[in-house]
Image (cartoon, rainbow, N blue to C red):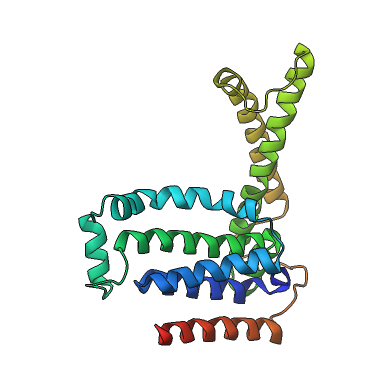
Amino acid sequence: MLSALHPLPKLALCLIWIAALVLVFDLRLQLAGLILALGLLWGVERIALGRLVLLMVPFALFGFGLLTTSVLFHRESGFVLQMAQEQGAAQPDAAPGLVLFTRVLACGMISTLFALTTDPGRLVRVLMIHLRLPAAFGFAMLQAMHIVPDLRRELLTLRMARAMRRGRPMRRVPGPTEVMSLAIPLLAFAIRRATRAAIAMEARGLRPGQPRTHLPQPPVRGGDIAALAGGVILLIGLLMAL
């Protein structure tokens, strides 16, 4: 359901929620944003809960120091206390470190919601059509999005070829020696991809100021506006309740 929404209203709604989470220093609002995004991904989009937990690990590690300092040692850093005071929470209901840790998770979950429910190619094309993103930047963004999974597939192919040549099963996790030996082949693959991308951009005539045509993209419909309005109204209701 969320994947069918237009990327621009969905992006605007996610940015509005993230801005509210950053500006309002309240644990209840952070938990509401986290639970709402998690519920949409798990209950509506049917994404496995284990995958969502793994995606949250980098965000949890980012704020883990604040959590341990606040909850385990009952001490707050000067940065955390200053942030709480600047955001109007001189005497917060919860530990400031816990609020910041939950904020990191909530913002990360909302970002994950947008990333997992939005097609990158469609997003870039919409940005080029509606927000006048230069075609050269859009094409470069598409290349960057595609090269990451291609590098992973190339790495797997190289490891499988070496394992077959040596007659030994491929290790689940490559060792340091294997990683170092694969660095040069992967670098050569990336250089070839960059060269092909540059030739393709030149062939497409991606020069500034040149008129271009685009494939037709679905316009913003009433359902997209209704979803945006519903998300904003829900956020306003939560802010008023808090």
Q: Is residue 125 left or right of residue 103?
A: right
Which of 229 and 207 lies nearest the eye of the viewer? 229
| Left or right of 24 in this view: 55 | right
Q: Position of residue 223 (x, y in %)?
A: 70, 84
Judge whether residue 72 can be spotted in this image: yes
Give the image location of residue 107, x and y in percent: 48, 63
Residue at (53% x, 83% y) in the render: 234
- 56 vs 96, left or right, is right
Residue in view at x 67 percent, y 81 percent: 224
Q: Can you give x and y, in whole percent of width and height, for residue 164 in the image?
A: 79, 18
Residue 211 makes an appearance in the image: no
Q: Is residue 164 above or below residue 29?
A: above
- Identify which residue is drawn at 69% across, 71% down: 2
Q: Quadrant of residue 193?
A: top right
Most foreground residue, 123 or 105: 105
Q: In this view, does 196 lie above or below 26?
A: above
Q: Nearer the viewer, residue 46 or 126?
A: 46
Q: Quadrant of the N terminus?
A: bottom right
Q: Where is residue 73 in the image (x, y as percent from the top left)?
A: 26, 50
Q: Residue at x 75, y 15 (%)?
A: 168
- In which quadrant is the C terminus drawn? bottom left
